[in-house]
Amino acid sequence: MIKKIAWETFKNTGDINSFMELKQIENIEKQIQNNYMNNYLDDKLNNEKK
């Protein structure tokens, strides 16, 4: 979704900085999701060992 917004913003404004900033936000969101899933799985595995 953010990728599409970033691309549309770039096409409308021609401002590559806006595109790059929105892409960074997209990457941060992916990292947060990955961290959440990794923590969830780690907790799940640790609870099963007990």
Image: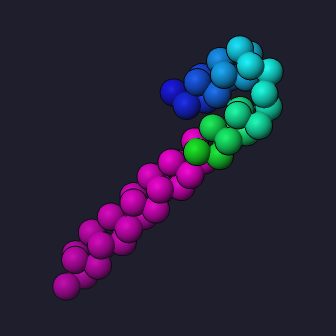
Give x and y (percent) for residue 44. Answer: 27, 69
With respect to residue 31, does 24 lie above or below? above
Q: Nearer the viewer, residue 2 or 15?
A: 15
With respect to residue 6, does 45 lie above or below? below
Quarter of the rendering containing residue 26: top right
Number of numbered discs on residues: 0
Residue occupying the point 66% across, 22% down: 9
Apparent side of residue 17 relative to residue 6 in the rendered image (left or right): right
Quarter of the rendering containing residue 8: top right
With respect to residue 43, does 20 lie above or below? above
Apparent side of residue 27 relative to residue 37 in the rendered image (left or right): right
Give the magenta-colored segment's residue range: 26-50
Q: Nearer the viewer, residue 30 or 44?
A: 30
Residue occupying the point 80% across, 21% down: 14
Indicate the colouring scheme. rainbow
Apparent side of residue 14 relative to residue 37 in the rendered image (left or right): right
Give x and y (percent) for residue 46. Answer: 29, 79
Residue 44 is covered by the magenta coloring: yes
Magenta span: predominant SS is helix
Residue 34 is covered by the magenta coloring: yes
Q: Nearer the viewer, residue 34 or 18?
A: 18
Give x and y (percent) for residue 36. Answer: 39, 60
Residue occupying the point 19% across, 85% down: 50
Q: Nearer the viewer, residue 47 or 5?
A: 5
